[in-house]
Image: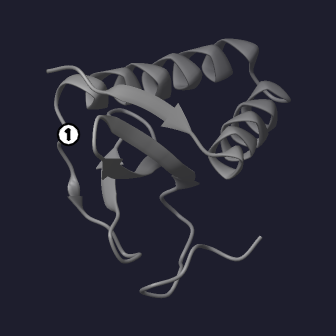
Amino acid sequence: MKREVEWSSDALADFGAAIDHIAADNQQAAYLVATRILNTIDLLGDFQTGRQGRVKNTYEKLVQKTSYIVAYTISGEAVYIVRIIHGSRDWPEGEWPAE
C-alpha cells in the first residue's frame, strides 16, 4: 500500500536552503541532489525503510550518493517528512540540529 507523503514546513525550508546553497556553485549538481532527495522521499511512500532516528519516534533514510538524510515519521496512512539534514551536521541525540 502506497502511503501519502507530506512535508513539514521545516523540511521544505531545509530542502530549499540545501538546493539553493548547492546551486550557488553548481546548478547541475543542485538539480542532481534535488532529484535524488525527491526520489528517496517518493520511495518512502512505497517502502518505509531507514534506521531509527535520533529524535524520538522518527526514522532516518540516507539519500544515496549524497550527504543528506531524510528524517520522517509514519502516521496512519502517511509518511511525514520532518527534516532534511546534511550528514556532516552534528546534533545531539533527541534534538534537531541547531540552525
Up-down relation of residue 33 to residue 89 (above or below): above
Camera sees residue 63: no
Q: Is residue 22 left or right of residue 58?
A: right
Up-down relation of residue 67 to residue 89 (above or below): above
Give residue 81's position: percent from left, percent from top.
Answer: 48, 44
Q: Is residue 86 left or right of residue 79?
A: right
Give residue 76's position: percent from left, percent from top.
Answer: 28, 44
Task: Give the colouring mode of the picture.
Answer: one colour
Up-down relation of residue 94 to residue 48 (above or below): below
Q: Nearer the viewer, residue 34 or 74?
A: 74
Q: Is residue 48 left or right of residue 15?
A: left
Q: Is residue 90 left or right of residue 17?
A: left
Q: Nearer the viewer, residue 44 or 20?
A: 44
Quarter of the image with the C terminus in it: bottom right
Amino acid type, label 1: Gln
Up-down relation of residue 63 to residue 73 (above or below): above
| Identity of the residue drawn at 54% across and 25% down | 33
The residue identified by callout 1 is: 48
Which structural element holds mark 1? loop
> Extreme front residue here?
76
Quarter of the image with the N terminus in it: top left
| Identity of the residue drawn at 29% across and 35% down | 77
